Amino acid sequence: MSESIFFTKQGYEKLRKELKTLKGSKRREIADALEKARHMGDLSENAEYDSAKQAQAVNEGRIYELETKLSRAKIIEGENISKDKVYVGARVRLVDTESNEEIDYMLVTEDEANFAEGKISISSPVGKALLGKKEGEIVNIRVPSGTLKYEVKSISR
């Protein structure tokens, strides 16, 4: 049996929307490009045809990847998760013990990670170190540039 992949509701919907686009408008766009390239003559030396075939292969590969992930998806529901410890889907406010700077993160799976949005993967060094921690705990996190020391200030869902 394949292992479940956890998503927030927003992350799950984002992947479903991408899948719908790839199977709909993107497939039509590629089919049109292939048809146009076929009319250009000899396919053995047709760069447009080769490019369209490559785009088709990439698109179909991504469709397969998304369908596989979505078939194993389990949506994280806030009410089903402990609110006193850091788990997937938690929003965490950290305080750097040296600079007193506050940092907010949401812990998500790799598929949803987006540092610009403050979403970090549970498989990242920071994410791994935070899993299971409670408010008030001090966390030492080894990263390539050294060691970070944070206090877990708050946890929310």
Image: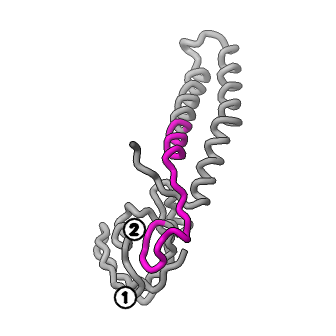
> Which residue lies most toward the top here?
42
Query: Can you give x and y, in whole percent of width and height, for residue 156 in the image?
Result: 53, 78
Q: Is 86 part of what is drawn in magenta?
A: yes
Mark 2 residue element: helix
Query: Can you give x and y, in whole percent of width and height, for residue 6 in the image?
Result: 48, 57
Residue under label 2, please give it: 127
- Quadrant of the rendering where the N terminus is positioned: top left
- Quadrant of the rendering where the C terminus is positioned: bottom right
Instruction: Reply above or below: 76 against 64.
Output: below
Q: Is residue 148 left or right of residue 117?
A: left
Tell me what residue is drawn at x 65 percent, y 35 percent: 23
Say which mark, if any, is on residue 97: 1
83 vs 128, nearest the viewer: 83
Q: Is residue 137 left or right of residue 37?
A: left
Q: Residues within 10 Å of mark 1 (few under 14, many from 20)?
A: some
Q: Residues within 10 Å of mark 2 (few under 14, many from 20)?
A: many
Instruction: Reply above or below: 86 against 14.
Output: below
Q: Are marks 2 and 1 in contact (CB under 8 Å)?
A: no
The kind of residue on which mark 1 rests is Thr
Residue 103 can be seen in this image: no
Res. 148 image quadrant: bottom left
Tell me what residue is drawn at x 60 percent, y 59 percent: 9
Q: Earlier in the sequence, mark 2 or mark 1?
A: 1
Tell me what residue is drawn at x 66 percent, y 19 percent: 37
Query: Mark 2 or mark 1, which is nearer to you?
Result: 2
Q: Is 78 part of what is drawn in magenta?
A: yes
Tell me what residue is drawn at x 53 percent, y 62 percent: 76
Q: Which residues are magenta?
A: 63-88
Residue 17 can be seen in this image: yes
